[in-house]
Image (cartoon, rainbow, N blue to C red):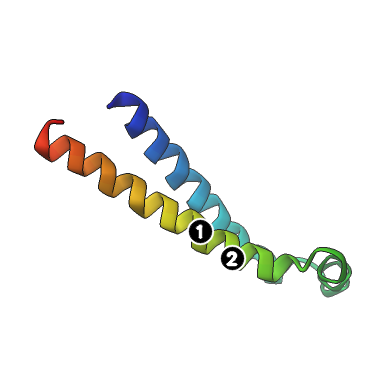
Amino acid sequence: MDQLFFFCIVVTAFNLFLIIYAFTLPLYPESWRKKVNKKYNNDTTTGITILFVTLACFISWIIYFYFLIFHL
């Protein structure tokens, strides 16, 4: 149970980091963003990563609270 709780906290912290990073993307210089987006498509990759990490965070918290409530 403690390991699952720790995993949930780590995934949530990573999710918050990604959300803060996404909000700070417009603060980077436009020339750097264009150069990085040509090679890695950074904006799209960040958005898709946020979606999947948020999904994993949501599911892990559901599993944790299910085990906590029903004492499995």
Residue at x 34% of width, y 51% of height: 59
Residue 41 lies, with reference to residue 58, above or below; the image says below
Numbered marks: total: 2
* Disc 2: CA contacts within 10 A as few (<14), some (14-19) or many (>=20): few
The amino acid marked with disc number 1 is Phe
Residue annotated with mark 2: 48
The N terminus lies in quadrant: top left
Furthest toward the top, the residue is: 2
Residue at x 43% of width, y 51% of height: 56
Q: Position of residue 53 (x, y in %)?
A: 50, 54
Residue 38 lies, with reference to residue 54, above or below; the image says below
Q: Position of residue 30 (x, y in %)?
A: 82, 74
**Tag on residue 41?**
none
Residue 9 lies, with reference to residue 31, above or below; the image says above
Q: Is residue 58 left or right of residue 27?
A: left
The C terminus lies in quadrant: top left
Q: Is residue 19 left or right of residue 56?
A: right
Residue 47 lies, with reference to residue 18, above or below; the image says below
Residue annotated with mark 1: 52
Residue at x 52% of width, y 46% of height: 14
Residues under numbered marks 2 and 1 in contact, where contact means CB atoms less than 8 Å apart: yes
Residue 49: image quadrant is: bottom right
Provide the secondary structure element on which disc 1 rests: helix
* Depth order, front residue of 58/15: 58
* Depth order, front residue of 36/32: 36
Residue 39 in sight from this viewpoint: yes
* Depth order, front residue of 52/35: 52
The amino acid marked with disc number 2 is Ile
Residue 47: image quadrant is: bottom right
Residue at x 50% of width, y 63% of height: 51
Provide the secondary structure element on which disc 2 rests: helix
